[in-house]
Image (cartoon, rainbow, N blue to C red):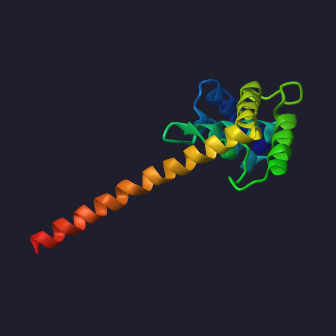
Amino acid sequence: MECNKDEAVRAKEIAEQKLTEKDIAGAQKFALKAQKMYPGLDGLSQFLEVVNVYVAHEKKTRGEVDFYGVLSLEPSADDETVRKQYKKLALALHPDKNKSVGADGAFKIVSEAWSALYDRSKRMMSDKKRATMNDVVKKPITTYSRKKKKAEKSTH
């Protein structure tokens, strides 16, 4: 088991290096590998929380950050749930508590998500944008399929 611990430490170090280099996918890959090899590794769970925030922040829809995803929430979450989840993540990621590489950046991302979702008017605007983006994504598919069907009918 000591062999796995040494390999897990090495994988975590690589993950930290990847995160420093802004290779989020690589950081996640090696952090999960370390977890698989030795789940109880010191600081690994904290580092994984940091990486998960960066992964969620990278997933964008039409260039917009999904703040619900950053806070690991559904868009239907009520204000109290948003507040509780923010508080939980803020405590876990605060640089005074979490000494992992990238914790300060993850904390800033979570704070940005909170500021976008705690204010009712900002949240409504964000939700409206989100709904509009979903409509825009759906429309071209329908239009394309109609044109394709018409083209198929005229060739037969």
**Quadrant assignment for the C terminus:** bottom left
Seen as rendered, the residue at the extreme bottom is 156
In this rendering, the answer to whether 22 lies above or below 35 is above
Residue toward you, 120 or 11: 120
Residue 86 placed where, x, y %?
Answer: 81, 41
Residue 126 occupies quadrant: top right
**Lateral position of residue 95 relative to residue 138, left or right:** right
Say if residue 42 shows up in the picture. Answer: no
* Residue drawn at 35 percent across, 61 percent down: 142
Seen as rendered, the residue at the extreme front is 121
In this rendering, the answer to whether 75 lies above or below 86 is below
Residue 37 placed where, x, y %?
Answer: 74, 48
Say if residue 36 shows up in the picture. Answer: yes
Residue toward you, 32 or 106: 106
Residue 16 placed where, x, y %?
Answer: 69, 29
Residue toward you, 57 or 74: 74
Residue 154 occupies quadrant: bottom left
Residue 44 placed where, x, y %?
Answer: 79, 39
* Residue drawn at 62 percent across, 47 percent down: 127
